[in-house]
Image (cartoon, helix red, strand yellow):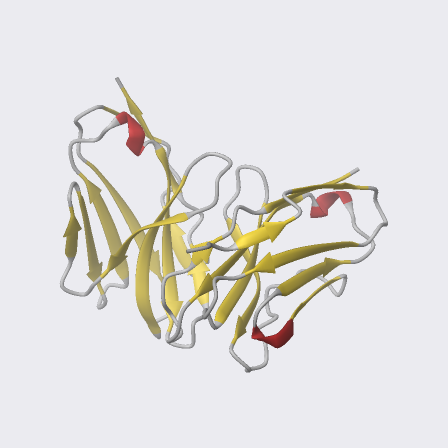
Amino acid sequence: RKEVEQDPGPFNVPEGATVAFNCTYSNSASQSFFWYRQDCRKEPKLLMSVYSSGNEDGRFTAQLNRASQYISLLIRDSKLSDSATYLCVVNTNAGKSTFGDGTTLTVKP
Amino acid sequence: GAGVSQSPSNKVTEKGKDVELRCDPISGHTALYWYRQSLGQGLEFLIYFQGNSAPDKSGLPSDRFSAERTGGSVSTLTIQRTQQEDSAVYLCASSPPPPGQTQYFGPGTRLLVL
């Protein structure tokens, strides 16, 4: 079993749709959590950090459930430009970082 | 400010040759990571440097792979006797202290072993 698991998708949604991605992690010592976005043939870039209380950045909402070892990302009012692969990242407090394999999103007109 | 830079951006080599890939992290970042990404696949962790601590080499796939970080800054990933299965994008990332912070990625080196 992988340390960080994501549904690979692909998710194909129309513009304006709401889509949710889930991620589970197995290391209970994990301390910090992130969502990254990776466009085709580009490097990953930080989308947002994930805080225990949940956090929102515009159309994006991230949530963390430490008891269930589960992270989610919600995208509202999807745009064509949201099409990308979304990577869940889990770090220990020693800085060891584990990436999920990513969930691919395609937003269609 | 300057981001993470990597060189070369592309490298084509013949099977059996050695290659060196370079990463210049963001100034002041104490952590440096190397990952490998094959086409259509996720990121594969290779090695992690944190300050002056011994590196975490647990992701290196074989003893043909090695990395060093000189003076706590620039890092070089060396692949000896390259094989075709080494073909991938090699990504470097750095992050500021304390450990566990956001990683900033370089553009990667695309390695093709013929």
Furthest toward the top, the residue is A109
In the rendered image, the vertical position of residue B14 relative to residue A108, given as above or below? below
Residue drawn at the location 44% of the way across and 61% of the way down? A98
In the rendered image, the vertical position of residue A29 relative to residue B112, given as above or below? below
Relative image position of residue A48 (x, y in whole percent): 27, 53
Relative image position of residue B12 (x, y in whole percent): 75, 39
To which quarter of the image does residue B89 belong? top right
**Residue A27 seen in the current view:** yes
Furthest toward the bottom, the residue is B53
The one nearer the camera, A72 or B102, is B102
How many marks the image carries: the answer is 0
The one nearer the camera, B77 or A26, is B77
B77 left or right of A36 in image: right
A65 left or right of B2 in image: left
**Residue A26 seen in the current view:** no
To which quarter of the image does residue A13 belong? top left
Relative image position of residue B49 (x, y in whole percent): 55, 72
Residue drawn at the location 81% of the way across and 54% of the way down? B18
